[in-house]
Image (spheres, grey):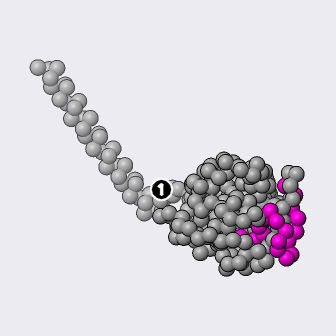
Amino acid sequence: MSVLWISAGTTHAALPRDCDDNSIIKCGATSAAELSERFNENKTNDLPAIYSSYGISAADIANASTIAKMGEVRKDGTIVVDGQVVATGAMSIGRQDIFSGSSQKKIGDKVFYETAPAGSFMRDSIAAHVFFNKDGEFKAAILTSCGNPVTGHPPKKPPVPVPVPQYECTILSARTIKLEDRHYAFDLTYVAEKGAVLQSVDYDFGDKQTATNLTPAGAKTIEHKYAKAGSYTTVATLHFKIPGSATVVDKKCAVGVTPTQIQEMCPQNPSVPKGDARCVTPVHELPKTGPMDMIGTGVGLSSILVAGYYWFMSRKDLIAASMNE
């Protein structure tokens, strides 16, 4: 393999060129513009077929200045761009079977020979035009010194962490609306994140009364009246749909309430309960009729009668005097 050192212009320092018969492009192409020019010349009449077999299209070659990056293929089989390994296990082809360990590769009606850099490189590394796919992964490279295409294996990307669904019943709380009616409100809070979805909620109030298949919005606050006093446990069962699971997962919350029997108070005497011995209808008192009361009453009546008699007589005399006149 002959080597000719020339200047690659202002973009690159001096790059080697291989101008032997093993080169896919004799003397290579050290710039994107030259690569496009040599590809269009296609002096060997096989360049489109060769590069296409490595996933490099004519459009890729024409736009190499914007879509390809300058990197290097190393003798250890790594392909490096900007100091980062973009592929490993490099293999390149040539036109001649001159290297130990090479294997045949047929492209169209021609046979080429594929070899690892460890068996074909005389230098530790060779500059290359490196092409990437739309996802930014290594696709193929073309050695600047000879135009030989290179394949390799992009490093495996770390698996994208799958978010772990979060779902739980945070708390079920109870508050009294009207104590004498044993009327309560139950407030529900829950978590449904990272793909988990609350589908419905069932309530069991502990007194054989239930409310089922409530929507998440309708289940956040619910009211219930207990018919009798006692101790009850209200349970909320939350039904969650989990990504990737064919079944629905249930989570439960519970809270206890103790509605009491409210004592009805006495209407006539609100300070004592109804049914208490002190809760009686008050009796209105009759006028007192004792002996002294009777005497006092008689004296009073007599005085009224006497006064009335004298008043009547004075009026009678007044009237008679007026008539005589």
Residue 231 rendering spot, x and y as whole percentages? 74, 70
Judged left or right of residue 106, residue 215 is left
Residue 288 appears in view = yes
Quadrant (top left/top right/bottom left/bottom right) for the N terminus = bottom right
Q: Which of 214 and 85 is in front in this view?
A: 85
The single residue placed furthest to the left in the displayed view is 325
Q: In the rendering, at what x and y percent does residue 134 appear?
A: 67, 55
Residue range corresponding to the magenta coloring = 86-107
Q: In which quarter of the image is the C terminus?
A: top left
Q: What residue type is labelled 1?
A: Pro
Instruction: Please give the name of the residue rendered at 69% of the width and 60% of the height, measured from the top-left corner.
Output: 26
- Compared to 298, does 19 lie above or below? below
Seen at 72% across and 65% down, the residue is: 20
Q: In this view, does 191 lie to the left or right of 291?
A: right
The residue tagged 1 is 287
Q: Where is residue 120 in the image (x, y as percent from the top left)?
A: 76, 74
Residue 280 at x, y percent in the picture: 61, 61
Decide whether the magenta segment is chiefly helix, strand or loop.
strand
Element carrying mark 1 = loop
Residue 91 is covered by the magenta coloring: yes
Number of marks drawn: 1
Q: Which class describes the residues within 10 Å of circle 1: few (<14), some (14-19), or many (20+)?
A: few
Tell me which corner region of the image, top left, top right, bottom left or bottom right, holds residue 28.
bottom right
Q: Residue at x 15, y 25 (%)?
A: 321
Task: Give residue 264's quadrant in the image.
Answer: bottom right
Residue closest to the eye, 292 or 211: 211
Res 224 visible = no
Q: Residue at 70% x, 49% y: name it.
A: 42
Does the magenta-highlighted stretch encompass residue 250? no
The one nearer the camera, 262 or 83, is: 83
Rendered position, 88 above or below 149: below
Left or right placement of residue 153 versus residue 127 in this view? right
